[in-house]
């Protein structure tokens, strides 16, 4: 649907005009019609209440943080996962995440 974030695998060059994908994953529809993302990256380290991305960004994960997989199921974050999410203040030294979408690559 328009506004959904999609991700998939292809054997084509990523900058080609047209891509052929065998599998495509998409987020579940949200009330605004768009997935709000203001941070993303690969997870380097996982702690009890935070994750550290490869670029050094610390993302705080609380009991209020919604962490889901692309199929909408609740999931855990592990080192090596690629995450995208929405934080209250994306310019803060530590990001307070409201929502995190986990992709296992």
Image (spheres, rainbow, N blue to C red):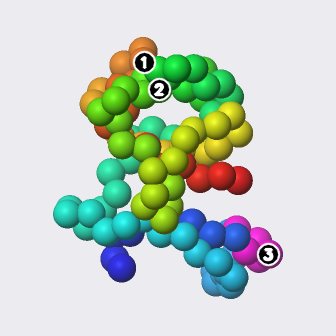
User: What is the x, y in percent for residue 6?
Assistant: 50, 68
Residue 94: which disc? 1
Callout 1–callout 2 Cβ contact below 8 Å: yes
User: Is 45 left or right of 28, judged from the image as shown?
Assistant: right
Q: Which residues are magenta?
A: 10-14
Callout 3–callout 2 Cβ contact below 8 Å: no
Q: Residue at x 45, y 38 (%)?
A: 39
Q: Is residue 54 above or below residue 6?
A: above
CA neighbours of label 3 inside 10 A, class few (<14), some (14 to 19), many (20+)? few
**Prevailing SS of the magenta stretch:** loop
* Quadrant in the rendering for residue 15: bottom right
Q: Which residue is mark 3?
A: 11
**Quarter the N terminus occupies:** bottom left
Q: Which is nearer the eye, 32 or 62?
A: 62
Q: Which is nearer the eye, 55 or 43?
A: 43
Q: Is residue 2 above or below residue 75?
A: below
Q: Residue at x 65, y 78 (%)?
A: 23
Q: Residue at x 48, y 65 (%)?
A: 71
Question: Is residue 26 located in the magenta-colored stretch of the structure?
Answer: no
CA neighbours of label 2 inside 10 A, class few (<14), some (14 to 19), many (20+)? many
Which one is earlier in the sequence, the residue at label 1 or at label 2? 2
User: What is the x, y in percent for residue 92?
Assistant: 36, 19
Q: Which is nearer the eye, 44 or 56?
A: 44
Callout 1–callout 3 Cβ contact below 8 Å: no
**Cα gap from disc 1 to disc 3, whole angstroms:** 37 Å
Which one is earlier in the sequence, the residue at label 1 or at label 3? 3
Q: Which residue is mark 2?
A: 59
């Amino acid at each position: 649907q328009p506004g959904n974030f999609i991700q998939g695998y292809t054997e084509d060059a990523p900058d080609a005009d047209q891509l052929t994908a065998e599998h495509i994953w998409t987020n579940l529809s949200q009330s605004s019609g768009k997935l709000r993302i203001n941070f993303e990256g690969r997870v380097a380290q996982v702690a009890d209440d935070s994750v550290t991305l490869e670029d050094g960004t610390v993302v705080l994960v609380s009991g209020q943080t919604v962490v889901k997989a692309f199929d909408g199921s609740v999931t855990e974050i592990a080192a090596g996962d690629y995450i995208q999410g929405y934080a209250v203040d994306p310019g803060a030294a530590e990001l307070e995440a409201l929502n995190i979408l986990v992709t296992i690559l």
